[in-house]
Image (cartoon, rainbow, N blue to C red):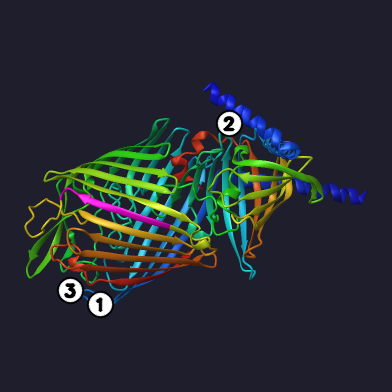
Amino acid sequence: MIASNTQKTLLTAGKQLLVLTALLSSVADAVEFEFSAKASVEHRYFFKAADYDPQLNHGQLSAMIEPELYWSWNNGADSVVFSPFYRLDNQDDNREHGDIRELAYVHAADDWEIRLGIRKEFWGVTEFQHLVDVINQTDGVEDFDGEDKLGQQMINLSLVNDWGIVDVFLLPGFRERTFSSENGRLQGPLVVDKNNVNYQSSAGQQHLDVALRWSHSLGDFDVGTYWFHGTNREPILTPVVEGSTVTLQQYYNQMDQLGVDVQATLGDWLWKFESIYRNTNYESFVASQVGFEYSFIGVFDSNYDLGLLSEYAWDSRGVVDLSTVNFGESSSVLQNDIFFGARLAFNDMQSSEVLIGLGSDLAHSATSFLLEASRRFGDSVKLSIDVRLLQSAEALDSAYTIRNDDHAQLALEWYF
Amino acid sequence: MLNKKTLLMALSAVGILLTSQAATAVTDAEQQGLAISIEAKKRDLGWGDSTADMQMLLRNKHGQASSREIKIKSLEVAADGDKSLTIFNKPRDVKGTAFLSFSHPVAADDQWLFLPALKRVKRISSRNKSGPFMGSEFAFEDLSSFEVEKYRYKYLSDEEVNGLLSFKVEQYPVDENSGYTKRIVWLDKQEYRIQKVDFYDRKNSLLKTLSFTHYKQYLGQYWRADVQSMVNHQNGKSTELKWSNYQFKTGLKDSDFNRNSLKRAR
């Protein structure tokens, strides 16, 4: 009898515990929270001393943290993401900077989605240049490749149709590009003045930019096209004399840009094409990037995959002599350039990977070489090594001023 | 046209006459092998959609281990291959990476990868069937949905595996990009569940063995193994897949498998 009473009590307690657990889990189901973060320490080493005073000579030490907080409810239909970012740098005051990469609310329904807040949006298919990618400003101090972007305020309505996805963007609030301070390398003798910024639009940074994009997958083809109207993300830099110093003034004009990107995925081949037509008050031009990627699976009788890439860049502006250029006319860095790349993936437990790339200007003697290698150690540490070599023989070439900025970069990354 | 047809028929009649009983037996074995696979597929039709969590444990021959965590959402598509969304959680450096696949029985699958660092959606080549999945001993093709059209078959014998009397069937991949010349598959006669698979490499030597254990039945019909163990006989490495939180008919729709859902997949 006593035993059965105890059993009863235990049963009741058990039942209560079950109810409590169910309640707790339903609350937990209501809002799901996830935290993750990336932190890294990196050291850059320039092989040659600086050409221009007071640029740093050899070593540049830096640390970065980027946490991500994510809440979702309604079975994932509603979510909020917050991703702040901060970098410390022991040489370049401008590179020591923070940003909100993302702070956005997303609501997803069956055939539409609304995204509000600060976000990143990438468009494009090619690897060596991201011509059509236009929504986010480049975080120029982050890295040399221009792939790091600043968060952009936006209202984005995305409509899913049988005939493709239509995205409407309203972009209030313009972000100015980040540039190195006078101590930073990978720039010429003139430093961009972050406090001397002019806009064509009287609304300045408050100009409301708009974009409309359609993208679709048609069998083996992935196609996208868009129209963008608003502030040009690329500033025109003009030397201004102030007393004894010369700095570069930033001028952001208004532009209309049409863009198209196509990728054909045909067996082992990826064929890629990107093109833009840009029209400003001062000029209009067309630029294209076209290329392919081919994969060899299991090379050398191993598990390694080898991808070979080649791309060609063309720009209707051609070679621009910056010393004789009219105000408002921009220069193109990649007007007749060819690129080759090889990516070797070891497909091992540590996801080891090596990428080498070679870029060459066919119009004048300028070549760049890059090597990127990375490997994971344990479950949450990754080590990467980047080497970049730059060669340029003609003063006209935009890479000429940074021809002595060859460097290697070692980064240790932690993931939480 | 008519002449050609007649000629062909005559030729095949001669062929049948010439190849005696052995040939007929082979045909029977092929027929039976195919019938077994059709029945296995038939028993697994109608599950609608599913979600599940997967943990991968990679071990090398020195005993070093590494783990991966993945979430998979799948949608059954009538008269075509399934759609699936794979979300990577571990290792941490690939967290947020997501993979969308529209599989097709014979034609090449359509596949997209979402790279969270750049917020980039990249269409990728689906030719890579034989390559390792996330550094594991599972190739991409080992994890794709089973479609009858992907193989030619030959029934070999009945054999006991995992204490269950099973059909032993040889399967020859139709796709020339497969990393295998053949698979030998054991399906138990009671429920037509795969118990074991031997994989033979392009040189036709035994490469790997996959064992399915801890089967559970869902919705009173669909069997899923909680544990899949792959052992590579040639390099001494192994990978164990542990499945959990299987849920069926969760209400997933076509709209949960497009570029937009790929970008926000968690």
Q: Which one is in front, A181 or A72? A: A181
Residue A52, disc: 3
Whether pointer 1 and pointer 3 mark residues with C-beta atoms closer than 8 Å, the reply is no
Q: Amino acid at mark 2?
A: Ala
Say whether residue A315 is magenta.
yes
Residue A322, disc: none
Residue B78, disc: 2
Element on which disc 2 rests: loop
Give the class, few, some or many, for how many residues have Cα within 10 Å of label 2's Cα (few <14, many ≥20): few
Residue lying at the far right in this picture: please name it.
Answer: A1
Q: CA distance from mark 3 to mark 2?
A: 67 Å
User: Mark 1 sits on what residue?
Assistant: A48
Element on which disc 3 rests: loop
Q: Which residues are magenta?
A: A307-317
Disc number lying in front (2 or 1): 2
Q: What residue lies at 49% left-to-right and 35% top-to-bottom?
A: B255
**Where A301 sits versus B77, above or below?**
below
Q: Which one is in front, A87 or A334? A: A334
Say whether residue A234 is magenta.
no
3 and 2 marks on the same chain? no
Q: Is residue A257 visible?
A: yes
Q: CA distance from mark 2 to mark 1?
A: 64 Å
Disc number lying in front (3 or 2): 2
